Amino acid sequence: MNSLEPITELIESEVPDDVSIARVTYEGPELIVYTDTPRKFAENDHLIRQLANEVKKRITVRPAPGTQTDPSTAKPVILDLLPEEAGVTNLGFYPATGEVLIEAEKPGLVIGRRASTLREISQKVGWTPEVFRTPPMESSTVANVRNFLLQERDERREFLEGVGERIHRERTHETEWVRVTTLGCCREVGRASFILSTPETRILVDCGDKPGAEGEVPYLQAPEANPIAALDAVVLTHAHLDHSALLPLLFKYGYDGPVYLTQPTRDLMGLLQLDYLDVAAKEGRTPPYGSEMVREELRHTITVDYGDVTDIAPDVKLTFANAGHVLGSAVTHFHIGDGFHNVVFSGDIHYEDTRLFNGASNDFPRAETLVMESTYGGRDDYQTDQRDSEEKLFELISETHEAGGKVVIPAFAVGRSQELMLVLEEAMSEGAIPTMPVYLDGMIREATAIHTAYPHFLRDELRQRILHEDDNPFLAEQFQQVDGGHDMRERIARDGEQCVILSTSGMVTGGPIMSWLELLGGEPENALMFVGYQAQGTLGRRIQSGRREIPFESRGRRNNELTLRLSVASVSGFSGHADRAGLEEFVRTMSPRPERILCVHGDESSTDQLSSGLYQDLHVRTHAPRNLETYRFD
Amino acid sequence: MNSLEPITELIESEVPDDVSIARVTYEGPELIVYTDTPRKFAENDHLIRQLANEVKKRITVRPAPGTQTDPSTAKPVILDLLPEEAGVTNLGFYPATGEVLIEAEKPGLVIGRRASTLREISQKVGWTPEVFRTPPMESSTVANVRNFLLQERDERREFLEGVGERIHRERTHETEWVRVTTLGCCREVGRASFILSTPETRILVDCGDKPGAEGEVPYLQAPEANPIAALDAVVLTHAHLDHSALLPLLFKYGYDGPVYLTQPTRDLMGLLQLDYLDVAAKEGRTPPYGSEMVREELRHTITVDYGDVTDIAPDVKLTFANAGHVLGSAVTHFHIGDGFHNVVFSGDIHYEDTRLFNGASNDFPRAETLVMESTYGGRDDYQTDQRDSEEKLFELISETHEAGGKVVIPAFAVGRSQELMLVLEEAMSEGAIPTMPVYLDGMIREATAIHTAYPHFLRDELRQRILHEDDNPFLAEQFQQVDGGHDMRERIARDGEQCVILSTSGMVTGGPIMSWLELLGGEPENALMFVGYQAQGTLGRRIQSGRREIPFESRGRRNNELTLRLSVASVSGFSGHADRAGLEEFVRTMSPRPERILCVHGDESSTDQLSSGLYQDLHVRTHAPRNLETYRFD
C-alpha cells in the first residue's frame, strides 16, 4: 500500500476543509476515494475532475461505510428523483462499496444533464449511483453476466485491489526495449495470440482457436509466454472465437490476473465461449476447459470504454478505439514506457462505415508500430460495394417471393446477422422488397439483444435511432424468434407464406441451418443465399462449389442423404472485414503513419501481398511474420 | 538406463562368441563398451567400426576393471612397444576406466600406422591407450588444463554418463519448428550469444563480453534463454572473449550441462578467461564470476574435433568445421530433427588461407539457414592484400633497423601475434628484413605454445613443417620471451641492438605495451606499428588518430604524461576476419547455398550493407537482426 500514501496525502491536501477522506484504495486501474462526507463531495461537481487531473488517475468517489441513509429510506428518495420515463427496472444497494446500482431502460434520464441527477442522488442519500441500461430486448447473457458479477462483487473487490497495487507498483526496469511475440494467426487465419513484452511487463493479446483445425491452438508453451501465471495482463480485442476461445485456458494454467475488454466484448465472449463448449460436447470432442473456467475468466474481467487511457502496468497504458468489425471490437493501442514506444494492434477491422458500426478509428497521439490484420490482404481481395451487394440480394429475395418460395440465409450469430437485419428492415420499410416475416434461428436473437444493451458501441445514426427516437430497428415486428424448436420450424416450413430465415451456423457446419436445409432444400422455389465467407472444408463451401447431394443425420428417414433442389446463390459485400482497399486506406490515412507494420491474421499469400503492397506504396518497413517469432522495437 | 538396453543387446549379438561385453554406458555423446576380453577385442580391428556403424554412434572400447595387467608390469611392456623417437613424457594408468594416458612428443609414433600400435598395447596389457601431444613449447595452460581434467576424471565420468543419458533420452516432441534468438552481437560487435531451440531442445551458442562496454552483456534474462539451468547444451565457436567471456557465468546461474568446443578452444578459453578476471581485478572492477567458475566450466567441457558428427540432443547433431579465424575456431553446423532443418553459425571466419590457418570451410551436407558474421561487412570494408601489407611492414621495419631503432607492435595474444611471428620468421629467413631478436611480451608466448600443442588445427603446410620436418617456425631462435618483468624490458630498451617487440594489449588499453611506450616512446628512431583493429575509445585508436601526449601511471616520474616522439604507422591486412569480399565469397561458394541468412556480429551499417548486398547478389532472404529477436525456420 506504499504507493498510495503520497496519493492519499495529495488528495487530502487538495480537498476543502469540510470534506473528509476516509480511505483511498485501488480498484483495478481506478483510484477509489472513500469519503465520510459524500454529500459534501457531491456538492462540488468540479472536485473529482480536479483531483483526477492532480493525481493523473481515474478517480471514483464512494461514501465510507455508515455514512449513507438506510436503504429502505433511500430507495423511495432515489425513485422520487428519477423521472417516470427513465424506466427503472432494478435498484440494488451494496453497503461494502456504498454503491447503489440502478438498471434502467433510459440510463440517460437517470444520469441527468452533466450527471446532475447522479450528484443529486449522492447528495441526498450518500450512496454512489452506478447506472446500467436495461436491454430493450431481453438478453439472458447480459442478465446472467451482470448478476454473476454482482454476486461476485465482494470477492472481485479484493481481486481489483490487488490488480491496482500491481499496476501501480514501483517500476524496477528501464524500458530498454519492446517485443512482440507471435503465438498464432501468422500466415493463417485463426488462433490470434500475441505477447507484448517489456523488461518490466508481459501482456497477452487475444487467445483464439482456429476454426476447422481444433488441434491448432496458440503456442502458449513458447518461453516468451511463460510462466502464464506471471503475465501482467490479458487484453481481448473482440469476442469472436478465433480471438477468445482459449482465453479461459489461461486460468487453468494458473493465470490469476485481469482481462481487459469492452463491456459488449465481455458479454459476447461469454455467450460464444459457452456455445463453443456446447458444440464441442455435441461433436464428441473433449473441450479444453469447462464452463467453470468461463466463470473464472468473467470474474477477472475489467471493462474499458473506447478512448479511456488506462494504466495496466507500471510502464503500459491501454486505449481501446472502435474497430468497426463487431460489437465492442477494439483497435488496441499500447503506450509504453512514458513515450518510449507505441504499438497498435488493429484486431479485426472494417474501415468503411457499415449500417451497424462506424468505420475503424485510426487516429492516435503516437503509433510507431502497427500489428495489422490481413484477412482480405490479397492482391485481388476487393469486395463488391455493399450497395451493389444489397441490390443483388433484394433482387434474389424478390424473385423468390414472387415464386412463392422462402429464402434461407446461413449467418454468423454475432455481427453479420445484425447487419443483415438492418439491411432487410430498411429494404422492407422502403419497399425495396416485400414485407414478410424474418425468422431468427440459433443464437442470432440473443446476440441481437446484446447489441441493444450497448447502443453506444453502434454507428452514430443507429445509436441515435435507438436512444432518442424510440425507433429501434431490431424491434421491428417482422423479426420473429424461432424458439419452439423443430416443431416451430416444421410449422414455418409447411406454412405457405413467403419469409426470410436467418439461421446459424454461418458455414453450414451444424446447428439449426441443417434442419432448414432438410425442411426447405427439396423445393426448387426456395432459395439458399450465402452472404459470408465459407471456409475450406465446410459444408457451406461444398454447396457453394456446386455440390447438391448432402449428408444428413436422418430424422426418421431411411436415407441419410438429401438432394438439394432449391436455388443457391452467393452475395459478397457483407463482410465484417475491410477488403484490400480498406486495409490500405486504414494505413494510408492512419495518423501518425506507423514506422513498422506486421501483417498478420491472413493466409500466407494475403499477408505477403499486403506486406509488400504497403511497403511499396507507403515506404514503411513491413513484415509478414511467422508464428513463434519475436520482433523487437526500439 | 532404458535407452541402453536395446543397444547393449544389439552389440552382444554382433560380437563373436569369444568376446565378452561387461557393460555398455554413455560418456557424453560417446558409447563406451567395457569388455572382459579386451585382448580379443583388440585382435579384431574391424569390430569397433562395425559396431559403430550398427548402432550409429561413436564407440570406445575399454577393458572391464580387473582384466588388465598390473600397471607396474604393464608400464615397461608399453614403453617397449613404443619407438624411442616417440618421446614419451608421461604415462598414467586410470583403473576406473581402464585407460592408460600417454603423453608424447610425437603422438603419431605412439598411435602407429592405422592405429596398429594402439591395438597392440590393448592386446598385450588390456589397457586402452589415450594419446596426447606434449607441446614442443612448454605451455602451462595446456599442462594445467590437462592435469585438472585428469584429477577430475572420476567426477567427470559421472557427469558424462548423465549427459549421455540426456542426449539419448526418448524424444517427446515433434520437430515442428527451429528458432534462433539473438541475445547479443546484433548490429554491434561484442557479446556474441544465441539460443537455438526446437520443441525438444535449447542450446546456447557463445556467451561473450563487449570490449569497451563492460556493462553490456548478453541478454541472458530473455525468456527464450530461461531457465538457464535447463539448457541442453552450450556450444562455443571459439575462445575470444567477445564469444566466451561470460560463459562461466552460466554455471553461477545453475547450468550443469556440457560445453562443446574444440580442444584448442578449451585451452585458449581458460587462458583468456583467467586473464579477463585478472584485468578486471587490476582495473578495480568486480568481475562477474570468480576463477572457481572457470574451473567449473572446464569440468563441463566436451571436446569435439572438426568433422565429427556428434549427437548433443535427441534431435540435434553438432559438427564443427575449420573457421580460419583463430586456433580451434569453428564454423558450427547443427543438423536438426533428422533432416528437418540445418543451421550453420559461421562464428568468426577468415575465408582466405592465412599463414596460420586454412580458409574457412563452407561445404556441408545440408544447410538451409546461415547465421553469418559481418565484422567487415560494410560496403567499403575491403582489406589490403596481405602481400602488400607485408611489404609495407617490411619496409617500415627495415627503415627503423637502418636508423638503429626498435619496432614496437601492439598485438592480440591469440591469433594475430602468431601470424606476425610467421611473417617475420619467413621474412628474416628469406632476407626480406634483417634478422634480429623478436621479443614476445605478455601472453603471446603462452598462446603460441598452445598453438604448438595442436598442430592439426593449423594450416596444412604449417602442420606439415611442424609434424614431419622438425622445422617449427615458432621455435626459431630469434623469438625470445620477455619474462624478467620490468628489469628485462629496461635491459632490452637500453641495449643498442635493433629488435622487434610484440606486446599485448593489442589496443593499448593496458598490459606490458604501456611499459614499452614509456621506455621507447621518447626516441624518434623507434617505431610504433599498429597491425590490428583499434576500437573506438581505446588509447590505441587515439594514438592512431594523431594524439602524442599520453597519460601514464607514473613509475617514479613526477609527470604522469608522456610525449611520444617515436614514429607511428598503421598496416592493415593482418585481420583474422574475412573482409567484405571474403564474406561474400564464403556465401557465394558455400555448398549448398543457404536459403536464409542472418547477418550478425558487425556494427549497424556493416550488417545492413552485408545483408542487402547478399540479397541483391545472391537472391537469398537476408536479415540484419536486432538483439532480442527470435527468428523461426521451417
Image (tube, coloured by chain):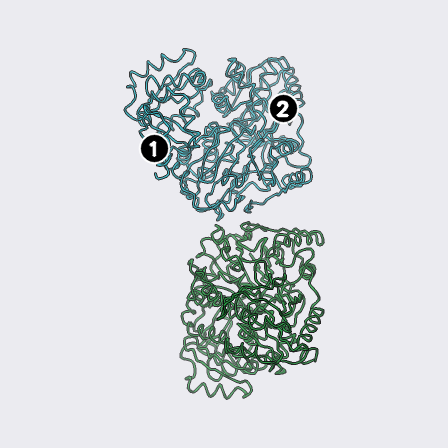
Chain colours: A green, B cyan
Task: Give above or below for B53 relative to A200.
Answer: above
Residue A41 x/y as whole percent = 50, 78
Q: Chain of mark 1?
A: B
Residue located beneath label 1 in the image: B155
Q: Residue furthest front?
A: A558
Secondary element at image label 1: helix
In the image, what residue type sits under mark 1? Glu
Q: Position of residue B369 (x, y in %)?
A: 57, 39
The disc labelled 2 sits on which kind of residue?
Leu
Indicate whether B477 appears above or below A537: above
Q: Name the subunit of mark 2.
A: B
Inspect this view and state whether residue A591 appears: no
In the rendered structure, which disc, 2 or 1, sits on the residue that comes first in sequence? Answer: 1
- Label 2 vs label 1: CA separation? 55 Å
Q: How would you rate the neighbour count of disc 1 (Cα within 10 Å): few for under 14, some for 14-19, many for 20 or more?
A: few
Number of the label disc, if any, that sits on residue B566: 2
**Which quadrant: the N terminus of chain A?**
bottom left
